[in-house]
Image: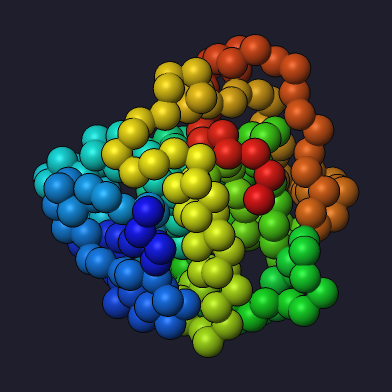
Amino acid sequence: MRKSLRIGVLALQGAFREHVRALRRLGAEAVEVRLPEDLEGLDGLVIPGGESTTIMRLARIYGLDDAIRRFHGALFGTCAGMIVLDQEHLALADLEVERNAYGRQVRSFEADVRLADDDLPLRGVFIRAPRVRELGSGVEVLGELDGDPVLVRDGGVLLAAFHPELTDDLRVHALFLELAKKMRASRPPGVPLPKEASARRAGPYKRYGQAPSAKHPAGCGVSPPRSPAPPGASGRRPGGRDVGPL
Ligand code: GLN
């Protein structure tokens, strides 16, 4: 089997070059993706920050929206990429976000993100960032800012509300490569997961940003309890790819 991971970066618009650079610094083979056929043989795909409306529009024009829905590798959405993967867009992750929730461009900021598995905080660059409004019960919170989940994982889908490619801290990209490696190990490239294995979860949603009490109460890294609700019970499209714990 190929040793280095081959990761695509959706290169329709936005900060794709910075992701390519970060992935190469970690030893991955990084390629720009502009057409559905570019996804062949990839272990993972990054959907960068930029402008989600533009990324969605161009993805539709090139048939990349359906191709990404069929893609079986790991996915990593940052900022606009997080929006693109949410339930109101490609519906590949079990969450809903509010665009530009922290205000206009001038309200963009940097802040320390508290990580679930690391005492050293991570500097996050938030540029017209989305904010999680609802989070599926199976989604793992990996990083928080003031009680808001800003780094989460839904199975094989990693999502950051900020821009990890704009700092020299490579921890989030390293985490994504770990996820892509794990998914590759569980399935040789080109072999689709059996239907049951890729079945998505559905469940009640945790609401954020409504009132302070609605924020994630248990703190960083404590996953909300899993729901016994049967798939589809909520009437929403569940997200994520089941790969177990990371
Ligand atoms: N506000 C942008 C959007 O709605 C996202 C900003 C970003 O990716 N930095 O798509």
Q: How many marks?
A: 0
State the image coordinates of residue 238 (x, y, percent, origin top left): 53, 27
36 on left or right of 233: left
Note whether 239 is above or below 98 in the view shown.
above
State the image coordinates of residue 30 (x, y, percent, origin top left): 31, 69
Name the image quarter holding residue 116: bottom right
Note whether 166 is above or below 62 in the view shown.
below
| Front-most of residues 98 and 231 | 231
| Front-most of residues 17 and 156 | 156
State the image coordinates of residue 180 (x, y, percent, origin top left): 48, 54
State the image coordinates of residue 196 (x, y, percent, origin top left): 50, 18
Residue found 34% across the figure and 44% down from its top: 189
Q: Would residue 87 be visible to someone looking at this image?
A: yes
Instruction: Identify the colour scheme used.
Output: rainbow
What residue occupies the far right of the structure in this picture?
218
162 on left or right of 57: right
107 on left or right of 214: left
85 on left or right of 151: left
Residue found 51% across the figure and 36% down from its top: 241
What residue occupies the far bottom of the structure in this picture?
168
Note whether 15 is above or below 208 in the view shown.
below
Note whether 237 is above or below 153 in the view shown.
above
Q: Would residue 58 be visible to someone looking at this image?
A: no
| Front-most of residues 50 and 16 | 16
Residue found 54% across the figure and 50% down from its top: 182
Residue found 57% across the figure and 82% down from its top: 169
- The quadrant the N terminus occupies is bottom left
What residue occupies the far front of the structure in this picture?
1
